[in-house]
Image (cartoon, helix red, strand yellow):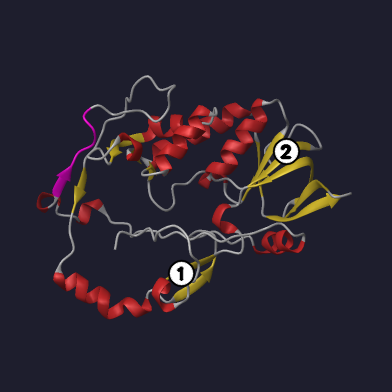
């Protein structure tokens, strides 16, 4: 724990993703003693699946967060290196702002926010909720029990999480990070509802290995439109994206191995948002 200022928190937020960050900042702005429990403070708000923010439907959510006083729009405006309004060829009702991010700049902006907020970071695994007379009284963690008057569980995909790498299934919330197994079991035991979300992480490509000259250039908007109503202008240098396409040989490889993909083999059975990888 980094120098907590009292023996009890007003609010403890479990989880260091975007939801956890917004919850912790909102609590701290109200003058409430706020602690965030996370396994790795260097990975708070990591853009793990895809280094971008927004897109169809998701972009509208970020705008709503901004209208409610949240920080996500401001952070991506500070770290964005390509701004594009999707679906311009259609009506305004389906336009979707999307920004590609420089992950290092994004992380730096998050770090500045936390340092200025007064939120205390507790590096630990949350194990269970401590209840008294039907109310939350604390969080039991791997670093000891932390008393509080209220708790926000913002664990994202980490509750009882599984990762699929080819035909291998691994317990984990994200590469190199363990799943929240104990907390997930207790949340079930006390009758709180649970659902399951799934996401797919595309391959990482080393830009130094790509022949960019053979690809179609896709620039961002000529005049970048900020996500946040509080951003005056975009100051980061903008970069191009590039488009490539599959081939008949690639299609054959996919079809020959489709049965091994977890979403087709039955290893992943949940219904929900579309599968993320492009193919």
> Which quadrant of the structure image shows residue 57?
top left
Real-space CA distance between mark 2 and mark 1, rounded to the nearest whole angstrom: 34 Å
Q: How far across and down, in percent of the image, does residue 40 sit?
A: 57, 49
Q: Nearer the viewer, residue 14 or 225?
A: 225
Residue 67 can be seen in this image:
yes
Task: Label 2: state its secondary structure.
Answer: strand
Q: Going 76% across and 41% down the picture, which residue do you hit? A: 150
Q: Which residue is mark 1?
A: 164
Residue 98 can be seen in this image:
no
Furthest residue toward top: 232
121, above or below 49, in the image: above
Q: Quadrant of the N terminus?
A: top right
Q: Nearer the viewer, residue 36 or 224?
A: 224
Magenta highlight range: 216-222
Q: Is residue 204 left or right of residue 106?
A: left
Q: How far across and down, in percent of the image, does residue 146 sit?
A: 78, 46
> Which quadrant of the structure image shows residue 106?
top left
Q: Is residue 19 left or right of residue 129?
A: left
Q: Quadrant of the C terminus?
A: bottom left
Q: Going 50% across and 35% down the picture, which residue do you hit? A: 110
Q: How far across and down, in percent of the image, does residue 246 sit?
A: 18, 63
Please tell me which of labels 2 and 1 falls first in the chain: 2
How packed mark 1 is, by other alpha carbons closer than 10 Å (few <14, some 14-19, many 20 or more), is some
Residue 86: image tag:
none
Q: Which residue is mark 2?
A: 11
């Amino acid at each position: 724990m980094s120098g907590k200022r009292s023996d009890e928190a007003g609010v403890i937020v479990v989880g260091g993703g975007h939801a956890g960050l917004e919850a912790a900042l909102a609590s701290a702005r109200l003058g409430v003693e706020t602690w965030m429990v996370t396994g790795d403070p260097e990975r708070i708000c990591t853009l793990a699946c895809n280094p971008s923010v927004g897109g169809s439907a998701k972009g509208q959510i970020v705008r709503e967060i901004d209208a409610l006083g949240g920080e996500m729009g401001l952070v991506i405006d500070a770290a964005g290196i390509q701004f594009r309004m999707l679906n311009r060829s259609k009506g305004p009702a389906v336009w979707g702002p999307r920004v590609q991010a420089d992950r290092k700049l994004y992380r730096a902006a998050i770090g500045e926010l936390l340092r200025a907020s007064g939120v205390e970071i507790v590096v630990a695994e949350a194990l269970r909720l401590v209840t008294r007379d039907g109310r939350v009284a604390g969080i039991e963690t791997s670093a000891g029990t932390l008393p509080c008057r209220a708790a926000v569980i913002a664990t994202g995909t980490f509750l009882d999480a599984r990762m699929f790498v080819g035909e291998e299934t691994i317990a984990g919330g994200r590469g190199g990070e363990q799943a929240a197994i104990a907390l997930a079991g207790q949340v079930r035991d006390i009758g709180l509802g649970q659902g399951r979300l799934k996401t797919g992480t595309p391959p990482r490509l080393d830009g130094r290995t790509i022949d960019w000259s053979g690809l179609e250039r896709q620039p961002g908007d000529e005049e970048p439109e900020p996500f946040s109503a509080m951003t005056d202008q975009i100051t980061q240098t903008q970069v191009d994206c590039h488009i490539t396409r599959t081939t008949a040989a690639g299609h054959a490889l996919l079809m020959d191995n489709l049965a091994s993909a977890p979403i087709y083999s039955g290893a992943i059975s949940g219904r929900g948002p579309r599968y993320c990888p492009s193919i």
